[in-house]
Image (cartoon, rainbow, N blue to C red):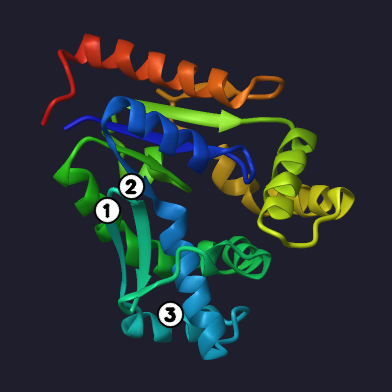
């Protein structure tokens, strides 16, 4: 099996780029952030105090989260319910990045799920700790980044397209805040990782660079067929 691990700051376009590259390469796209978001949604719906790691950890035993694949792409299921749209709200995004994703027990809870998916097929996986903790043996590790302003513009556009209120300055403030929260994790980049800065590049250009990297690496590895 061939695995591509993509990490990077919030709003860098990891999910959309990984999804498009997976389609071109014939890989399975695994949005690990969706699993974290599903847990955040579960905790919000249960009224759990997200500032209390012990309270969040105690509720993990009741979480049933899974990913489903088909012609529709990836669906995120929470207790068998499709929550693919619900987990993309700003409330869930902030709850995930500010609290849930930083709780060690949550991260440990998800490691087995993530590694299990990578054993089943060639995958592109994006999210926190993918290249360092989840898939340390991934054949290609990419750190996808962009300037804070560029990421805020993209996020603002995404929110507007989803019909949600969006103010660029507020979104930029949140992007900078998330960068500070994620600073410790972002410093733990894999030594064998490749930086891909998408500032000033079109979406198509970023996807092309990523797929070119993958094909070159697969050629060197003797192919990525499982």
Give the SS element for disc 1. strand
Residue at image point 81% right, 47% down: 172
- Residue 167 location in percent, x, y? 86, 54
Q: 65 or 57: nearer the eye?
A: 65
Quarter holding the C terminus is top left
Q: Measure the C-alpha gap from mark 1 to mark 3.
A: 28 Å
- Ranked by sequence position, the earlier of labels 1 and 3 is 3
Instruction: Please give left or right for residue 97 compared with residue 157 in the image.
Output: left
Give the SS element for disc 2. helix
- Disc 2: which residue: 134
- Ranked by sequence position, the earlier of labels 1 and 2 is 1
Q: Is residue 139 visible?
A: no
Q: Is residue 88 visible?
A: yes
- Disc 3: which residue: 57
Q: Measure the C-alpha gap from mark 3 to mark 2.
A: 20 Å
Q: Is residue 187 above or below residue 212?
A: below
Q: Residues within 10 Å of mark 3 (few under 14, many from 20)?
A: some
Q: 193 or 46: nearer the eye?
A: 46
């Amino acid at each position: 099996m061939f695995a591509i691990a993509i990490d990077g700051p919030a709003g860098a376009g990891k999910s959309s780029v990984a999804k498009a590259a997976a389609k071109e390469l014939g890989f399975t796209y695994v949005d690990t952030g969706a699993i974290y978001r599903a847990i955040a949604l579960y905790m919000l719906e249960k009224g759990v105090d997200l500032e209390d790691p012990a309270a969040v950890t105690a509720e993990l035993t009741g979480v049933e989260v899974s990913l489903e694949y088909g012609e529709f792409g990836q669906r995120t299921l929470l207790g068998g319910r499709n929550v693919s749209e619900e987990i993309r709200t700003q409330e869930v995004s902030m709850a995930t990045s500010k609290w849930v994703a930083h709780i060690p027990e949550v991260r440990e809870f998800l490691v087995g799920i993530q590694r299990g998916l990578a054993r089943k097929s060639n995958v592109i996986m994006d999210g926190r700790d993918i290249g360092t903790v989840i898939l340390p043996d991934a054949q290609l590790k990419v750190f996808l980044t962009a300037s804070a302003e560029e990421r805020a513009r993209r996020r603002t556009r995404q929110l507007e397209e989803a019909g949600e209120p969006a103010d660029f300055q507020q979104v930029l403030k949140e992007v900078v805040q998330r960068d500070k929260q994620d600073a410790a994790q972002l410093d733990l980049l894999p030594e064998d990782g490749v930086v891909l800065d998408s500032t000033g590049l079109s979406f198509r250009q970023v996807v092309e660079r990523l797929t070119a990297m993958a094909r070159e690496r697969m050629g060197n590895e003797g192919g990525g067929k499982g």
